Image (spheres, helix red, strand yellow):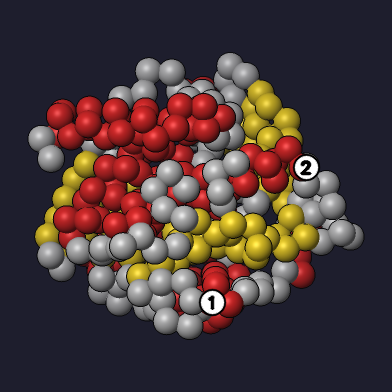
Amino acid sequence: MAEKLLVVGSVAYDCIETPDDSADFILGGSASYAALAASYFAPTAISAIVGNDFKDSDVKRLTARSIDLSNLQSDSSKPTFFWRGKYLENFNSRETLDVRLNAYENFKPQLDETARNSKFVLLGNISPAIQSAVLDLVREPQFVILDTMDLWISTERDDLLKLVRRCDLLILNDSEAKMLAGTNNIIVAGRELMKLGVKSVIIKTGEYGAMLFSGDGFFVIPAYPVAALHDPTGAGDSFAGALAGYLAGCGKTDFESIKLGMLAGAATASMTVESFSCYKLEENGRDEIDRRCQYIKKISQI
């Protein structure tokens, strides 16, 4: 039976420059990417905040996917969270040129009764303090997924580790995993992170795919081969969102279900990187996600 997924994170406006193109004030943020991805697999709600400049057209983009915005707060006195970044040649690294918390400076999460009863929760990339505050409001979550980044590992490590112990699945990329585990070996990192109290750990390895560490086994999935990389922003959020949506949609959290959720995540993330924001994903939808899932299955013999 499908369960509703609650997605926590940021809703933002991004200005992005790549080696070949640029885009200004496009819909971004971890909650936006994750919720749009998840919406292809399960009913989805967002807990976040926007500012006085949030466009009606972007509200419509979210509601067009039937995303529940009942818990999307609005601050009439400040603009929406803002990020400006520049990708260097070959997209191997990026620079943050400007970041403004804006509406998030005094964000105090609130949830309605439906959201408080959520069984599946994705704590998308945002500060551990906000993630914890939202999780505190959820009565009896069945499965909690935590996504994080190097900034929080560096600046809020203790709070992050406390939060990890409350979650079932931890998702991070390879450099973040090594950083949090204190090792340069990705396999050792996965094993060490399992000792933090979670049931499973997924380490994303970019264009090479992702690894799953669990008490029930080890699994590696390749990435879908993307020939037209346009903007990698939000790929990790889309991966986590599709994975969480898949699990909520099937109502299962066993090892095999997480593997299939990773398949959905890899396929969905491959579409996100083919355009700025989530335009490519929104344009092609579930049929293309399924086609890419089948392709990954074929090449990996899942």
Residue at image point 12% right, 65% down? 216
The residue located at (62%, 74%) in the rendering is 112
Q: Residue 154 at x, y = what percent?
A: 52, 63
| Image quadrant where one finds the N terminus | bottom left
The one nearer the camera, 209 or 72, is: 72
The three-letter code of the residue at mark 1 reads Arg
Location of mark 2 (residue): 55
> Residue at image x 12%, y 60%?
217
Residue 63 shows in this picture: yes
229 vs 123: above or below: above
Comes first in the chain, label 1 or label 2 = 2
Label 1: how many Cα within 10 Å (few below 14, some 14–19, many 20+): some
Element assignment for label 2? loop
Residue 211: image location, x then y, percent: 24, 49
Please, what is the three-letter code of the amino acid marked with disc 2?
Lys
Q: Is residue 232 left or right of residue 47?
A: left
Location of mark 1 (residue): 116
Taking the image as shown, residue 272 lies to the left or right of residue 249, namely right
Residue 290 position in % (x across, y down): 30, 33
Q: Nearer the viewer, residue 27 or 159?
A: 27
Residue 164 visible? The answer is: no
- Where residue 4 appears, as percent x and y from the top left, is 45, 62
Between 264 and 192, the residue placed more toward the observer is 264
